[in-house]
Image (spheres, helix red, strand yellow):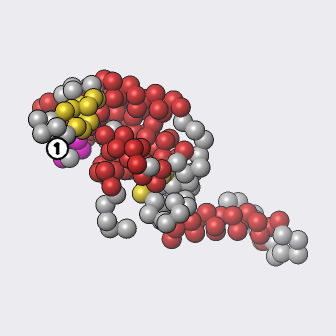
Amino acid sequence: MTASAPHELDLVIDFVNTRDLEEGTDALSRPQELAEWLAKRRLGTARTLAPDERDHRRAIELREALRSLMLANNGGPPAPRAGRELERAAREGGLGIHFADDGSASLAPGAGGLAGALARLLIPVADALGDGSWQRVKACRAADCHWAFYDRSRNRSGVWCEMAVCGNRTKVRAYRERVPARPGGRVAAARPGGPGSS
Ligand SMILES: [Zn+2]
C-alpha cells in the first residue's frame, strides 16, 4: 500500500480525500486552505492562485465530481454530470496538448492561476484513462466513507478503502441487521431501555 499509483494519480486521490466523510472534516473548507493545498503541491503560489468564493466553489464541485467518477469505477451509478464538470474545468484551464522542442507531447494547462491548477489535476485522470488504470481509482463503497484509493488487487475487485476497516464495518452492520430477523435467534427486546436501535 506504500507504492504510489501510476500517472501521479495520488495527486487526484489526495485531492478527493481532503474531505473525510467519516470524520466529517474538510481540509479545503476555505479558499485560503485551497490555495495552500495547491501551492504545497507546486500547482501555483498563494499569490497567483488567490481563489475567491466562486473559485473555491468550483474547486469543491470538481472534487465531488471526481469522487462520483471514482464511485462509478466501484460499481456505483454512472456519473455523466461529473464528466461534464471535468470537461468544464479542463476548458477553463485551457488544457491542451503541448508539443515540446524535442518532439514529445504532453497535456498542459494553457491558463495560469487557479483555473490552470485545477486543470492540472485532470492530467493524471486523462493519462490513466489512456491505459485503463483509471478504472482502478475508486471511492470506497461504504456510504459513510467514500474514501478514494487505488485498487491494486490483481483482478481489480477491490471495493473497500481498507478491508480491515470498511469491509469489516459493513460486514458487522449486515450481521446486526440479519440477526434479529433470524428465527429462533436470541432477541434483546426483553431488556428494559429498548432493543438495540441501530
Ligand atoms: Zn472506506
Name the residue rendered at 88%, 71% in the picture. Answer: 183
Residue at 23% across / 41% down in the picture?
38
**Residue 8: x, y in percent?**
29, 51
Q: What residue occupies the far right of the structure in this picture?
A: 183
Q: Quick check: 106 left or right of 147? A: left
Asked whether residue 161 appears in the rendered view, the answer is yes
- Name the image quarter holding the N terminus: bottom left
Where residue 170 sits, quadrant-wise, is: bottom right
Q: Which residues are magenta?
A: 36-40
Indicate left or right for 168 with 30 as reference.
right
What element does badge 1 sit on? Answer: loop
Residue 142, compared with residue 53, is above or below; it is: below
Residue 175: within the magenta?
A: no
The residue pinned by badge 1 equals 42
Q: How packed is label 1: few (under 14 Cα within 10 Å), some, or many (20 or more)?
A: few
Q: Nearer the viewer, residue 53 or 127?
A: 127
How many discs mark residues in the rendered view? 1
* In this view, 91 is above or below 108: above
| Helix, strand or loop: magenta stretch | helix
Residue type of the residue flagged with mark 1 = Arg
Tell me if residue 39 is in the magenta stretch: yes
Q: Is residue 20 visible?
A: no
